[in-house]
Amino acid sequence: MALRNAVMAALLEGEASGYDLAKGFDASVANFWMAAPQQLYRELERMESEGLISARVVEQERRPNKRLFSLTEAGMEAVRAYVAEPPGKPTTIRDELLVKVQCADVGDIEAVRAAITERMEWAAAKLARYERLKERLLKGRTEDEHCARAERVGPYLTLLRGMAFEKENIQWGETALRILERRAQATRDGERAASRT
Amino acid sequence: MALRNAVMAALLEGEASGYDLAKGFDASVANFWMAAPQQLYRELERMESEGLISARVVEQERRPNKRLFSLTEAGMEAVRAYVAEPPGKPTTIRDELLVKVQCADVGDIEAVRAAITERMEWAAAKLARYERLKERLLKGRTEDEHCARAERVGPYLTLLRGMAFEKENIQWGETALRILERRAQATRDGERAASRT
DNA sequence: CGCACCTACTCAATAAATTGACTAGAGGTG
DNA sequence: CACCTCTAGTCAATTTATTGAGTAGGTGCG
């Protein structure tokens, strides 16, 4: 029942449909919590049945109707209760890329390098998006002004974390690529030397 | 079936019991992949039945016997196949702390600050452990020397990523605490002002 | 004009992950 | 000596998460 907390966090930004949430909903929450569509739809229904959120059907002309969910008073109370409860164990990090990097020495180094490169491109794209989101949040004000005046700082703080994470991905990727390239080089040299014998 | 890849990555370091893996197994793999004990025991059995790993029972005098698993040739082949296959979608990040931070504005700011502080302490402890592990890996050599001579660089690269991640946790935590403190201050001031009316 | 893709979902099935309880001997603490 | 923790697991139950297929109209592209 941790997904529901992420959903509530997302709904603090305003009402959203299951589809919105599945698509990343402004990337702010998707930044630190991702879930497959089915999971969201199921959870939303459960939450509605428990009275944490309420749906409003919006009829649309040239596309399927959608249900916009928003937090009820009970939902707001649940958020407050959740925030107050003692923090659970550390983050669940599961990074396939790092599993591959760990195995680099017994596998195809070029494949690993390709995977790292892909990750770096992904990170760069995400970072650009975050950058735009930040501009939109700050609206030309400095960080100090924004934090002093805006009614919410949570989204700004999580955005900062997301940006730092992606920057790290890129920086680390550069180092890793460099080191692996030298390895691949050495392997090729070794092969050449061996083939000369 | 992604856990098994992490298990194989861990077993590249040498044989290990299910208990070892559950305890973090040298922290190297635990850094980017965590799993509950039960999950590991189940997966290990399945992998053994599929011939990817083999067990060796070690009888112990004053404690339960244990089964040390190691990769078979088939397991090694599976690792190579896994590394070569195209990279899947991005990382699964699920960070409860960030969910709380996102909700900070409607909840108890002090509780959020406490959660951040706890995370920072955790991160600092992990970082110290990684630092020691790094020393052990490098054995007094520079990074360049190690990467040129050591037979494996994968563990070093993932370690670097883990260290960068924890450093980021700490740095971001400082910023977040500072901003939230000013918020809490403003709220208290607001309350004082309101109570004077 | 046909095909792929976008919105906005639902349903069903399977796989993976978490939780709780239990075994059992060893070692240490109050 | 009762209680707690550590090693090294097992078993069962439940909850969560992922995958795949299906619906149905609309949009854009060559």
Image (cartoon, coloured by chain):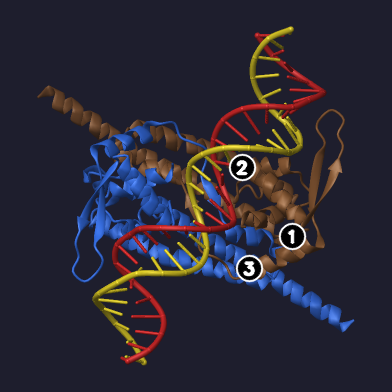
Chain colours: A blue, B brown, C red, D yellow
In the displayed structure, A144 sits above or below B188; it is below
Question: Up-down: is D6 above or below A183?
Answer: above
In whole angstroms, how far apart are the C-alphas of marks 2 and 1?
27 Å
Instruction: Identify the residue at horizontal 26%, vertical 66% (top origin).
Output: A64
Left/right placement of residue B31 relative to residue C12 reads: right
The quarter holding residue B160 reads bottom right
Residue A31 x/y as whole percent: 41, 55
Callouts 2 and 1 in the same chain:
yes
Q: Residues within 10 Å of mark 1 (few under 14, many from 20)?
A: some
Reply above or below: B100 against A35.
above
Outermost residue, left side:
B197
Residue nearest the observer in this picture, A97 or A143: A97
Q: Which mark is residue B152?
A: 1
Q: Residue at point 60% right, 50% down? A: B33
* Apparent side of residue A129 relative to residue A89 in the rendered image (left or right): left
Whether residue B142 is visible, yes or no, is: no
Q: Read off the chain for label 1.
A: B
Q: Earlier in the sequence, mark 2 or mark 1?
A: 2
* Residue B158 percent coordinates (x, y): 63, 55
Q: Amino acid at mark 3?
A: Val
Question: Which secondary structure lies at badge 3?
Answer: helix
Helix, strand or loop at mark 1: loop
Q: Quadrant of the N terminus of chain B?
A: bottom right
The residue pinned by badge 2 equals B36
Tell me the number on the disc at residue B90. none
Q: Is residue B174 visible?
A: yes
Q: Residue at x 37, y 54 (%)?
A: A41
Look at the numbered disc 2 and give the secondary structure of its residue: loop
Task: Indicate the position of residue C3 as horizontal and vertical percent values.
Answer: 41, 85
